[in-house]
Image (cartoon, rainbow, N blue to C red):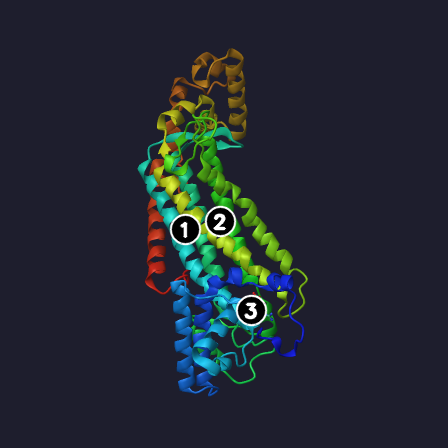
Amino acid sequence: MALWGGRFVTETDELMRCFGDSIGFDRRMYAADVRASVAYAAALARAGLITIEERDQLVAGLEQVRAEFDAGTFQIEPGDEDIHTAVERRLGELVGPVAGKLHTGRSRNDQVTTDLRLYLLDEMASLREALIELQRAIVEKAEAHLDVVMPGYTHLQQAQPLLFSHWLMSFFWKFQRDGERLAGVARRTRVCPLGSGALAGHPLGIDRQALAAELGFATVSENSVDAVSDRDYAVEFLAWAALVQVHLSCLAEELIVWASREFGFVQVDEAYSTGSSLMPQKKNPDSLELIRGKSGRMVGHLVGLLTTLKGLPSAYDKDLQEDKEALFDAIDTLKMELPIAAGVIRTLKVNTARMAAALDDAILATDLADYLVRKGVPFRQSHHLVGQAVRRAEELGVSLKELSLADYQEIHPSFAEDVYAVFDFRRSVEARDTEGGTAPAAVRAQIERARQISESANQQTTKSSPAENIKMG
Ligand code: ARG
């Protein structure tokens, strides 16, 4: 019989039962559910609501339930509508009637959101590690290719020369912000709703602060009505995941374009590519295409949960059960994508010659304008003058470098023989040597800072227990 069966005479419609069940997806929270129940049993004992012996019986039974799940031997029975029901049912079989005391003052409404917070905190810690691994792959690749110059693009049109490493490191910082944001989400997730009951609070005087501390929460929720309905942390997590996803998809898109024959800047390793069943020559960057393609579901999860939450009446509504699949899928997706992205980066072949060959003199037009600026011409004017030089070169069908000095001087008398020294891609890159610029020295300093940041973050993530270790930031 269902936990709530007392007042019912008619059986639940079979289809309705399947419709309402969440055990199919929420069973993955079993460890969190057991953990929260163990702490709750201790809190009940501290409040004198059960004896120490009863507490020990409950805890031993709960440990047994956890062991069965760990071993894969736990049998889901008909009527186990969700993980909370399943654990309680099995506990009853193992320890007898005392199991019925565990739910004293507790509702699945405060239980489910406690479990979900605990579960998420653990997953956040492993996602943080995966993110750091990706950042490490980026730093190592950038360091190994410090002397590679390539065209930098805006609007996907050649803009200014860049170091390949500088381009790659641009993603390090996006993922760095993602890591910091995750720490913020974790901080707001570390609030304990247990002890809120169904919606009105706990009637039997348990010590919520001690309960929260035992579970690794930083604090307790302030309002029981809010506590059972609050899924802000889930929304924030999905927003975080969607943004990581957007960053991953941008990285993927650029590499896909660059792996094409037309660009040939990079080669995706065979370990991360697949072939075609029809065209024997094909080597497709499926890894990156899938990463790009996952954007649909990841953004969808965020919009989906927000839509579920919109306009809900206070406290718990069954609609809230819809929070989990989105979260679980976002977690599963990122847990695949992050290491795959790291693998693609680590094994990526960088074709220096193709990058060099793609550099067009016109990409140095800004440097030419800067040249005039150094001769005292105001930038707005020099920009215009170089524009004239570009047009003149186009008319003559030559590159900027091939334009004669006479042609240059006709445009402006400040042009001199030394103008030809401008046509050096490396020199252009080296000139951008202020902090955050693409000069090798600046990129080296950037990589050094990145290393320090990821090393210290990594120390923090491995130092303490999973739910704790996301505290940084
Ligand atoms: N399976 C439910 C969920 O995921 C647990 C809470 C059920 N609470 C209730 N009052 N029916 O939201």
Q: CA distance from mark 3 to mark 1?
A: 40 Å
> Label 3: few (<14), some or many (≥20) within 10 Å?
some
Amino acid type at circle 1 is Leu
Question: Based on the displayed image, in which of its 4 quarters is residue 155 positioned?
Answer: top right
The amino acid at mark 3 is: Gly
* Residue 3 position in % (x across, y down): 57, 75
In primary-sequence order, the first of circles 1 and 2 is: 1
Which mark is first along the chain, 1 or 3? 3
Residue positioned 46% across, 14% down in the render: 403
Q: Residues within 10 Å of mark 2 (few under 14, many from 20)?
A: many
The N terminus sits in image quarter: bottom right
Q: Please give the name of the residue rendered at 58% of the width and 70% of the height, measured from the top-left corner.
A: 228
For label 2, the SS is helix
**Image depth: mark 3 or mark 1 in front:** 3
Work out whether residue 96 or residue 449 is closer to the camera in this orientation and state it: 96
Residue type at tag 2: Val
Instruction: Check if mark 3's residue and mark 2's residue have beta carbons within 8 Å.
Output: no
Disc number lying in front (3 or 2): 3
Question: For this view, does 24 lie left or right of residue 272?
Answer: right
The answer to whether residue 408 shows anywhere in this view is yes
Residue 368 visible in the snapshot: no
Tell me the SS state at disc 1: helix
Q: Residue furthest left?
A: 144
Tell me if label 1 and label 2 are in contact, CB under 8 Å. yes
Residue where numbered disc 1 is placed: 131
Q: Nearer the viewer, residue 162 or 411?
A: 162
- Cβ of mark 3 under 8 A from ligand 1: no
Residue 79: numbered disc: 3
Residue 412 located left or right of residue 469: right
